[in-house]
Image: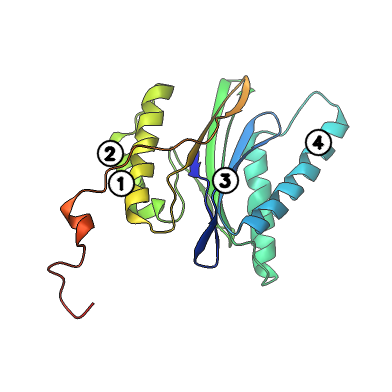
Amino acid sequence: MASDTGASYGSTLRYKSVERIKAVGKHSLIGASGEFSDFQEILRYLDELTLSDHMWDDGNSLGPKEIHSYLTRVMYNRRNKFDPLWNSLVLGGVKKGPKGEEKYLGMVSMIGTHFEENHIATGFGNHLAIPILRAEWREDMTFEEAVKLVEKCLLVLLYRDRSSINKFQIAKITTEGATIYPPYSLKTYWGFSHFENPAQGAVGSW
């Protein structure tokens, strides 16, 4: 899972060290785009959920599939109250089951639309990153190969999205637990001729 660390105030990129990937319980990671204060509200819901689950002390714990199902109900409920949480959420994780390691990756939108997939993106990533992932993703990728592919997607998004920021965070999760790496920057090159004069040859007065 990966995201940038920028947060906007209106159309102003004001905060540049906002971490939008969090661990949930023992087996899951959640990432969010959209309104950051609404994401904080969702994290409070998840804290209550995981605490309640822990207090049962029955040797079982919520996996990513159960948490994703919970989030779909929360988002759809708020949408029906005409008070939606303005986020797109990605929920991924790994849990040991009767068939071995059970990997899970799901997405839920602000109106409760949800699905599972091998690779997921939100926002501009739906248009620019998903085609790259469809072309280059393999099920047997190593962690290093996966990071390079994700960085390629992040670089394309950085070049194309004025609200993006060159500061990213990568996270992974295994049956051993979640690891959220410190933010870092990617090497960029802005000398392309189309970057210097993007309107050259465009039709109209813009």
Residue at the disc numbered 2: 135
| Residue hosting label 1 | 131
* SS category of the residue bearing label 4: helix
Q: Is residue 7 above or below residue 92?
A: below
Q: CA distance from mark 4 to mark 2?
A: 40 Å
Q: With respect to residue 1, does 16 lie above or below?
A: below
Give the number of the mark in front: 1 or 3.
Answer: 3
Residue marked by disc 3: 17
Amino acid at dot 1: Pro
Q: Nearer the viewer, mark 4 or mark 1?
A: 1
Q: Amino acid at mark 2?
A: Ala
Residue type indicated by callout 4: Asp
Cβ atoms at labels 1 and 2 below 8 Å apart: yes
Label 4 or label 2, whichever comes before in sequence order: 4
Label 4 sits on residue:
53
Most distant residue in the left direction = 201
Drawn side of residue 50 relative to residue 17, left or right? right
**6 over 35 or under it: above or below:** above
Tell me which numbered mark, 3 or 2, is placed earlier along the sequence: 3
> Considering only order in the chain, which callout, 3 or 1, is on the residue closer to the N terminus?
3
Which residue is depicted at the point 59% across and 43% down?
A: 19
| Number of residues whose C-alpha sits closer than 10 Å to that of mark 1, classed few (under 14), some (14–19) or many (20 or more) | few
